[in-house]
Every structure is written in C-alpha cells, then in structure tokens.
Image (cartoon, rainbow, N blue to C red):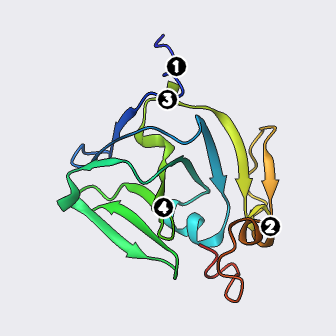
Amino acid sequence: MASKPLENQPIEGHCLCGAVTVRGTPVRRHVEACHCEMCRRWNGLAFLGAQFGPEVEIGGEDHVVRYRSSDWAERGFCGRCGSSLFYHYIPNGNHSFTAGLFPDDAFLPLSEEIFIDEKPAYYAFDADSEKLTGPEVMAKFGVGQESAGSSDGD
C-alpha cells in the first residue's frame, strides 16, 4: 500500500487516455463534492474534486477543451477521451480538479459538500462532511449574487 503524500508535496494525475496530465499541490488534502445541477450534468453525478491554487502544471494543453459555464468559471475536458478535468474559478485562478485524475491515496476523505440543496434524492454520500446550500456558497465566495440559481450556480 502506497503512503499518503505529504501535505505540501505535489501530486500528479492524468485523464483516461493520458493525453492531459496535471501536476500541482492541493490547497487541502481532501475531496469536496458539488451537487449543483451543472456539475451533475457535467459528470453524471456530483463533481468530486480537489482544490488547487493557480500554480498547477497542465500537460497536453492542446487537448484541453474549455467551456465557459458562467461569468466566473470555466470547465475543462480532454478533447481526446472526454474526461472531465477541472472547474476553473476565474477571479482567483484556482482550479478544482476531478479527484479521479489522481491516485486513490492522494486525498483524505470527503470533507465538504456544496449546493446540498440541489442534491437529488437518488444518491447520498456517507461522510461526516460540512454541507453548504447554494446561497451559503455564493455568500461565502461573494459571486453571482444577482444570478445565483441551479441553472447557473457555477
């Protein structure tokens, strides 16, 4: 069994086909879930991601397709295999990369769930995690107050 990476050490990951690689140090070593409607449409279920600051290395950038999903964010996909790669929060440059890009032992358990008020009844995570509603998330980050809602929450 591999040991968990140290908190301040970078980790590496890649998409399904390996055309896009990622290397960076997560802000925190835990996974977060977003239950908003857009994330569920994008992933088929909640988006499970890990936060990284703006200092990340993305290899194979020519294979990255970006979709501007709101005034403040874009989402990245691998144009070759279709893997969901990241949610990019434009105002501060941070990225949330799909946790599945990285080795299974790279993160601690699920610690936060956002847009919990948009989570459908057909799934639930068994984690003792902080849970924030859409309005709580928008207030926390101070974005999209005039356009918040399930159709353009992030």
- The residue where tag 2 is placed is 136
Q: Disc 2 marks which amino acid? A: Glu
Q: Disc 1 marks which amino acid? A: Lys
Identify the mark at residue 87; answer none if there is no mark: 4
Q: Is residue 131 above or below residue 12?
A: below
Question: Which residue is outermost to the bottom?
Answer: 146
- The x, y position of residue 97, in whole percent, is 46, 50
| Mark 1 to mark 4 CA distance (whole Å) | 24 Å
Residue 154 placement, left or right of 74? right
- The residue where tag 3 is placed is 8
Residue 1 placement, left or right of 128? left
Q: Nearer the viewer, mark 4 or mark 3?
A: 3
- The x, y position of residue 83, in whole percent, is 36, 54
Q: Nearer the viewer, mark 3 or mark 1?
A: 3
Q: Is residue 109 above or below residue 22?
A: above
Write the residue at 78% across / 42% down: 129
- The residue where tag 1 is placed is 4
